[in-house]
Amino acid sequence: MTFKIYEKRRSLKSFLFEKYLRYTSKTKENLSSREKTKKMVALQAEKNKKDYKLPEMKFKTKIEEDNYQNMQVFSLNNKKSK
């Protein structure tokens, strides 16, 4: 895995956002060893296999739920092509 380091001057907002991400996520810790990385990937794979339930919201258009190549897909305002 490679990371690119941005060496030019960045905005304060960008710097603070990076710090926020670093302290709130455990990504760096989870990727610190090969075993932890494998464990994190396996855990995320299990989470991604589960169907997603849309939260209760009101839409003016109809929401269609389909399955495309074993992947759950939601369509809003789907205009069928002829």
Image: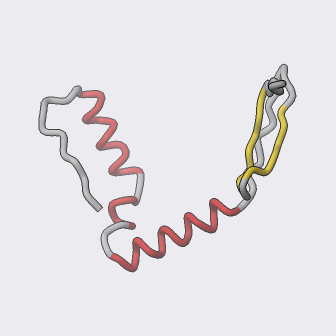
Occupied quadrant, residue 49: bottom right
**Residue at x 77% of width, y 48% of height:** 53
* Residue at the outermost bottom position: 35
Query: Residue 55's quadrant in the figure?
Result: top right
**As drawn, 38 above or below 14:** below
**Residue 59, image x and y in percent?**
82, 24
Residue 44 in the image: above or below residue 11: below
Residue 34 vs residue 52: left or right? left
**Image location of residue 52, percent across then percent down:** 73, 51
Residue 44 lies left or right of residue 54; in this view the side is: left
For the point 80% across and 27% down, the residue is: 78
Residue ranking furthest to the front: 82
- Quadrant for the N terminus in the image: bottom left
Work out whether 32 lies above or below 66.
below
**37 lies left or right of 43:** left
Looking at the image, which residue sits at the far top? 60
Q: Quadrant of residue 7?
A: top left
- In the image, residue 80 lies at what x, y percent? 83, 27
- How far from the left and from the top, in percent, is residue 35? 39, 79
> The C terminus is located in which quarter?
top right
Q: Nearer the viewer, residue 61 or 40?
A: 61
Q: Tell me the residue at 63%/63% (across/down).
A: 47
- Relative to 64, say whether 82 is above or below: above
